[in-house]
Amino acid sequence: MELKAGDRLHSAVSDTEVIVIKTTGGNVTLTCGGLPLVPAGENGARGQIQPGQEGEVLLGKRYVDEEDTLELLCTKPGLGALAVDGRPLGLKSAKPLPSSD
Amino acid sequence: MHLGLVLEMVHSGYGSRTAVTVGEAALDYAALAERSWAASEYIGELGVPSVVYIGGNDLAYPVALFGAAGAGVPFIPLNYRLGTEQLGVQVGAHPGSLVLHADRIAVGSDPGRTLACQSFLERTHGVAAAPPPPVDPELPCILLYTSGTTSAPKAAVLRHRHLMSYLFGTVEFASADEDEAALVSVPPYHIAGVANLLSNLFAGRRIIYLDRFDPELWLQTVRDEQVTQAMVIPTMLARVVTHLDGAGGADAPSLRSLSYGGARMPVQVLQRAVELFPGTGFVNAYGLTETSSTVALLGPDDHRTALASDDPGVRARLGSVGRLLPGIELEVRDESGGRLPAGEAGLLFFRGEQIAGEYAGEHAGRSVVDDEGWFSSRDRGWIDDEGYLFIEGRADDTIIRGGENIAPAEIEDVLLACEGIVDAAVVGLADDEWGQRLVAVVVPEGPDTVTAEQLKERVRDQLRSSRTPESIEFWPELPRTDTGKLLRRQIVARLAAG
């Protein structure tokens, strides 16, 4: 699917919801637990987590690809590992800014 | 990205953690979210086009803000300290609104849609409400009146996506330890008050609201509540420093971070504050209402490095606003739009997802963001070779004397550094010979502490004769907004009237 910042996506295998924080565009396949994420609000039948795609998406954590071209923020936690075009997304190491307010 | 997402996240993430306290009253995160959802339902049923808030830092503030956001209508916090007449004009600019007010403020043209903050809060109690459906991120979320130091106040429009871009770009969810508490004394109708609320809630901090600022009360609250973060405007910090005059320290070891912004901070006040709060990290945040708060900041390490340095260029950074936030771009341009290199002062243009730059009412539809997304801030400044941003002030305040552009801030800094001077402002008055002539107005510490001649000599020594004020007036105080910004228009008017 064509992603843009601000898109909200829902997992097809669990309660997981993410929001796209950063993307360089282009057509990609985002999966959770091995099944493609769907736009939030268009929740269809729930599928099974695919073998090798087990994992957990944690509330408020950011997930990025290795090239740092894609960043997702988890707005609802759930089961299943996140991946883009078959490559797993990793937890972004938080480098918080000093609190300015 | 709509503001309601924040509530859903903090509701499931923090639950019974305390979210907001005002005196003895408090709401935990679950209660804050649930009351806000109930408020959205109530506002939706009323069918009002917006919610006007004329109150202080009260529990009703976050509930009304998130309630309006969830209902998809703009939240409009007004300065409750304005006179009845001015408030009437601003309320009148938003017909049909639900008007929430503190009991001490009498307003409201339509009694059916006017409610005391306390009654509003009671209506949200014990209502089992679910999160409202997501609202369009393009919808206006908050209308904030600008300070209006150079022209009449305008209502800046911040859409859901602007505020969310700021929040997601600058704050980590759950980044606060469970013991962290933020003391908030900036007013609710100021962008710092809005940004503060969102950032602290998203991080999971306990917010402690002070409804009125008083240096002793502020310090006592820091000590009693073991406050870890606080945000102040420069005049508040100046009052804390004055209050602690003669004391060796502030005795506030819990305070990890003290951020300041909203107006120029005199370096003398900052240096004294750093001595009084030795264990505290200082943060200078620079931003405008139209940029959804902070676009540049000077962090604790920057402060320490500048203070410890013998290099005048590095030391000068204490007077800068630091470096740009990730995701924010800056161009410094001359009057004809040409891009200027580092070291040269000009007009500041910002670009980024959080930047709004549009206004409501008679200014609606006239965005000050160009086709390429650049927002003309009308602030003047320059960056040094390592990207530190120095703000000279508003472009409209620039004085043109004999064809030479003069930033008042440069002269004000010299005057403020003089012994016996508490406050200073430099303005331009119409002059037949020079176009404008320089007049300084200073507030002396006491009678006969310093003479006009001594002050002129200092400026002449440090700058040059063309920047030396032609005359210097002594006033008991300078007119400022209640968030500490100089009201130059009033100074000029008073001087012109003689």
Image (tube, rainbow, N blue to C red):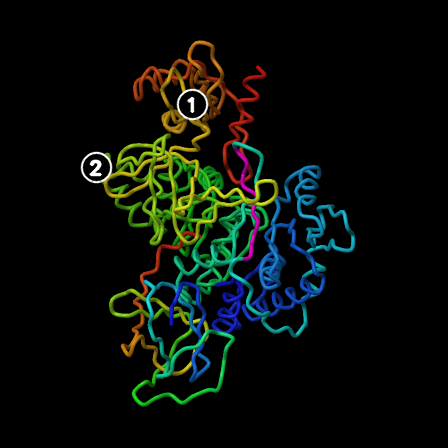
Please, what is the three-letter code of the amino acid marked with disc 2? Asp
Which label lies toward us, 2 or 1?
1
Residue furthest right as drawn: B111
Left or right, residue B310 beside residue B496: left
Q: Is residue B233 magenta?
A: no
Q: Which segment is the magenta one?
A: B139-149
Looking at the picture, how far across and down is residue B457, in whole percent?
Answer: 35, 15
Q: Residue under mark 1: which chain is it in?
A: B
- Quadrant of the rendered structure where residue B155 is? top right
Q: Which residue is mark 2?
A: B310
Residue furthest left as drawn: B311
Label 1: state its secondary structure: strand
Q: Which residue is mark 1?
A: B399
Q: Residue under mark 2: which chain is it in?
A: B
Please, what is the three-letter code of the amino acid marked with disc 1? Ile
Looking at the picture, how far across and down is residue B231, in whole percent?
Answer: 46, 49
Q: Nearer the viewer, residue B283 or B495?
A: B495
